[in-house]
Image (tube, grey):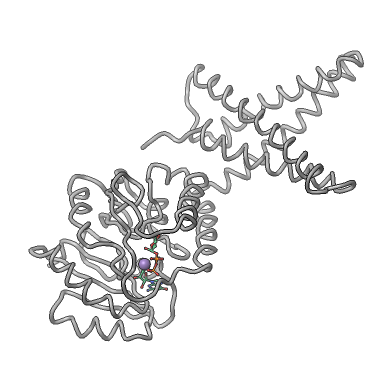
Amino acid sequence: MDAAVSLIIPTYNERENIEPLLQRLGHVLSGLNYEVVFIDDNSSDGTAELVSSLADRYPVRVVVRKDKRGLASAVVDGLGQVSGDVIAVMDADLQHPPEVIPSLLNKIKNGADVAVASRYVPGGGCQGWSRTRRLISRGAILLAHLLLPGTRSVKDPMSGFFMFRRHAVAGVPLSPTGFKILLEILMVGRHRAVAEVPFIFVTRERGQSKLSARQQIDYLKHLASLMRRTGEMARFVKFALVGASGVGVNEGMYLLMTRVAGLVDSLDVLAVAIGIEISIITNFILNNYFTFSDRRRRGVKAFFSHLLRFNTVSLAGAGIQLGTFFILTRFIGFEEPYDILANLIGIAVAMMWNFLANNWWTWKPQRN
Ligand code: GDD
Ligand code: MN
């Protein structure tokens, strides 16, 4: 008989946590037909042997992978090992209290395709975290929300504690890098309703964390890979191309007005201003129908309100470019000929601003 709930738990040197974890799971899930599959990356402390020896007392199995390929990929391998329609993923170190599982299950039963145990909804939190660690965690989430708009409706897309229906991942190619398997499922999985329930990420009592600088770099790689796979990278390239076309429009308008229409010398500033505004408008139109065509809203009213937003962002971008140039040349010492470089850096910073602000605000994705 298929399990009602299948738990996938990645382990690397978690021997001391296995029994307390299984005990608590047993209490929480008593009366349910559940299975626990540990995906162990060849721990040297005897984790796998211990799990095997407990198989007569608990519904557990362990799959040992010979080389260490990481947390998220362990979960992907676990998917091929479990039978249930409802699948949960959690850590083995008890930082994810098993007592939260019933509320996750509840959300799934009430129609959610994915239920996330979340540190960042009211009632959730992290025990004993320093200010720096909190900041890094928040920064990582902000980055995901900025670069992968599909994650925006989830407050804690970095959680490693969640539950989902099998159909959310069935037939979906998952190729996460690093620790963040939920991020992968949220971005490429098939799901409509995602729910969050609060939980407190408690301190580790036994064993050691495997989080290191390596995982931070893996996270950035994973973000880039998801941007490529979901078309967000292509969007950025389109945005850059449109921006380049705007430079042409800008210069062309200036030449048209001063050389062809023959604006008198003292009106050259006006020609520049008109050139700027016209290029903002052509950039907007191109972005609206090309870069962000999937998020374009119909109707004249929407067109103008988006144009107004785009204009605001662009003018702020110009301010940012100017400010960057000013700081680099006046305070950091970018003297001639490095003023050219300073201006290029200003352009790059402003372009990042323009992309992110328009992505976030002007063409805000509709809630699904
Ligand atoms: N198979 C396998 N391979 N398991 C691993 C590996 C690995 O390379 N690295 C870590 N694990 C297992 C650990 O044994 C533990 O059960 C779980 O993955 C989490 O590892 P920790 O080292 O305790 O990670 P953490 O507490 O820093 O990170 C957790 O919290 C983050 C939120 O701050 C994870 O749940 C992250 O996914 C989560 O984002
Ligand atoms: Mn941990």
Within the image, what quadrant is residue 315 found in? Answer: top right
Viewer-nearest residue: 18 or 41? 18
Vertically, is 282 above or below 10? above
Within the image, what quadrant is residue 184 found in? Answer: bottom left
Going 25% across and 54% down the picture, which residue do you hit? Answer: 165
The residue furthest left is 31
Quadrant into which the N terminus falls: bottom left
Image spot of residue 348 (x, y percent): 70, 44
Image spot of residue 137 (x, y percent): 45, 54
Q: In the figure, is residue 266 to the left or right of 194? A: right
Q: In the figure, is residue 172 to the left or right of 338? A: left
Image spot of residue 206 (x, y percent): 32, 75
Ligand 1 is in which quadrant of the figure?
A: bottom left
Viewer-nearest residue: 55 or 247? 55
Going 84% across and 44% down the picture, which residue do you hit? Answer: 340
Going 89% across and 15% down the picture, which residue do you hit? Answer: 266
Within the image, what quadrant is residue 313 found in? Answer: top right
Viewer-nearest residue: 214 or 276? 214
Image spot of residue 146 (x, y percent): 51, 44
Quadrant into which the C terminus falls: top left
Vertically, is 72 above or below 11? above
